[in-house]
């Protein structure tokens, strides 16, 4: 499914299916011995989506040992299930720690952009007085809110949903939801930038900069060598999992064109930058990666920016 300017999706198709994939990996990661993360809502949210492929992954019916393995597949590459699970565990912990550190520093206003099936408003130990804004398409927000209510889940912070597409006037919607741009805030743009055209990525950072008081923080990530390498891995992922029912080719969902690396753009806009590679994060988690997979992880850059 090729992207268009005003395309929409549910959580079983297009960009929405990638959010469900990520949640499935968080669910698996949460169940591993010595788990890096604990997301008790990921499994039931994925099951509520109802897509058989993802349910099969959760139940262990679809795994790296399932029949029909790609004979050219490297058992240690990103699109294999264990590697994907490790990647999402490491990435999730990075953003969890970002929010924990931000709130420990006194920030009480949080914005999660393109929140998908993220459950941080329900599972992180937010300090009293924290307000968490979740921004995503209306259908995604409604699905998650309804599904978590049926589970009896209660947010651990004041949760305010902002049901708007980031291609629309989300700044006004965020302000109308009560966002106070005079107060420092903590922002996340996790797994988002590659699904934006280059100019839209710049506009997103411009908007965040406009809304951010001094002391605000932003966590995001990008691929240092751009989209081509990502597309190559995405096509391999589609071949590997398409035989089991995953019919979303992520390579058709990302946008081409030259884009300014997030760290460079934010630095020029007056943010102080701290950057880490995904390889650094794997090492911090005690996960060993070598060869071509290590090179791939070194091209994935996570950024924490602080507004001066």
Image (cartoon, rainbow, N blue to C red):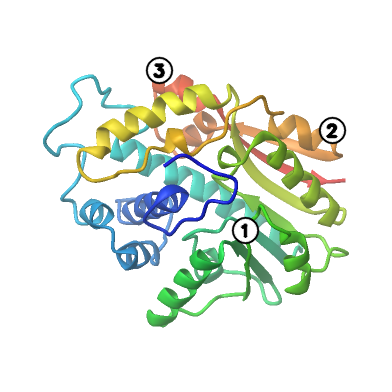
Mark 2 in CB contact with mark 3 (< 8 angstroms): no
Measured from the top left, where is residue 13 in percent x and y?
39, 52
The one nearer the camera, 48 or 304, is: 48
Q: Which residue is mark 2?
A: 268
Q: Earlier in the sequence, mark 2 or mark 3?
A: 2
Whole-percent x and y of residue 14?
43, 48
Which residue in the rendered view is the most extreme toward the left?
67
SS state under label 1: loop
| Viewer-side residue, 292 vs 13 | 13
Rendered view: 172 above or below 193: below
Note whether residue 148 is visible.
Answer: yes
In the orientation shown, which residue stands out farthest toward the top?
291
Does 164 sit left or right of 295 as displayed?
A: right
Residue 104 visible from this viewpoint: no
- For image coordinates 23% across by 46% down, the residue present is 245
Q: CA distance from mark 2 to mark 1?
A: 27 Å
- Specify which label sits upstream in the sequence, 1 or 3: 1
Neighbour class for label 3 at 10 Å: few (<14), some, many (≥20)? Answer: few
- For the residue pair 126 and 251, the one nearer the viewer reads as 251
Q: Earlier in the sequence, mark 2 or mark 1?
A: 1
Q: Is residue 101 above or below residue 193?
A: below
The mark lying in front, picked from 2 and 1, is 1
Residue 270: give x, y in percent of width and height.
Answer: 87, 39
Q: Cα distance, mark 2 to mark 3?
A: 32 Å
Q: Mark 1 packing: few (<14 Cα in 10 Å), some, or many (20+)? A: some
Residue marked by disc 3: 292
Q: Secondary structure at mark 3?
A: helix
- Please identify, in this view, whether the residue under mark 1 or under mark 3 is nearer the observer: 1
Q: Alpha carbon of mark 1 to alpha carbon of mark 3: how far? A: 36 Å
For residue 165, the mark is 1
Which disc is residue 264 wearing? none
């Amino acid at each position: 499914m090729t992207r268009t300017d005003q395309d929409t999706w549910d959580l079983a198709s297009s960009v929405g299916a990638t959010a469900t994939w990520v949640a499935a990996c968080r669910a698996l990661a949460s169940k591993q011995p010595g788990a890096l993360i604990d997301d008790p809502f990921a499994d039931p949210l994925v099951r509520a989506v109802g897509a058989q492929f993802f349910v099969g992954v959760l139940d262990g019916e679809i795994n790296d040992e399932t029949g029909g393995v790609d004979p050219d597949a490297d058992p240690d590459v990103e699109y294999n299930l264990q590697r994907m699970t490790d990647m999402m565990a490491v990435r999730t912990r990075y953003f969890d720690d970002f929010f924990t550190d931000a709130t420990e520093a006194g920030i009480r206003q949080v914005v999660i952009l393109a929140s998908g099936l993220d459950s941080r408003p329900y599972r992180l130990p937010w300090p009293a007085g924290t307000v968490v804004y979740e921004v995503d398409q209306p259908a995604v927000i409604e699905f998650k809110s309804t599904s978590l209510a049926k589970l009896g889940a209660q947010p651990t912070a004041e949760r305010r949903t902002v049901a708007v597409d980031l291609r629309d006037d989300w700044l006004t919607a965020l302000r109308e939801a009560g966002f106070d741009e005079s107060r420092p805030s903590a922002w996340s743009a996790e797994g988002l930038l590659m699904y934006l055209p280059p100019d839209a990525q710049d506009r997103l950072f411009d908007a965040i900069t406009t809304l951010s008081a001094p002391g605000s923080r932003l966590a995001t990530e990008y691929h240092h060598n751009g989209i081509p390498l990502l597309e190559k891995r995405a096509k391999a992922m589609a071949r590997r999992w398409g035989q089991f029912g995953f019919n979303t080719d992520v390579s058709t969902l990302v946008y081409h064109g030259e884009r300014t690396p997030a760290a460079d753009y934010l630095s020029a806009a007056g943010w102080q930058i701290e950057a880490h590679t995904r390889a650094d994060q794997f090492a911090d988690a005690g996960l060993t990666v070598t060869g071509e997979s290590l090179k791939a992880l070194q091209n994935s850059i996570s950024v924490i920016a602080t507004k001066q």
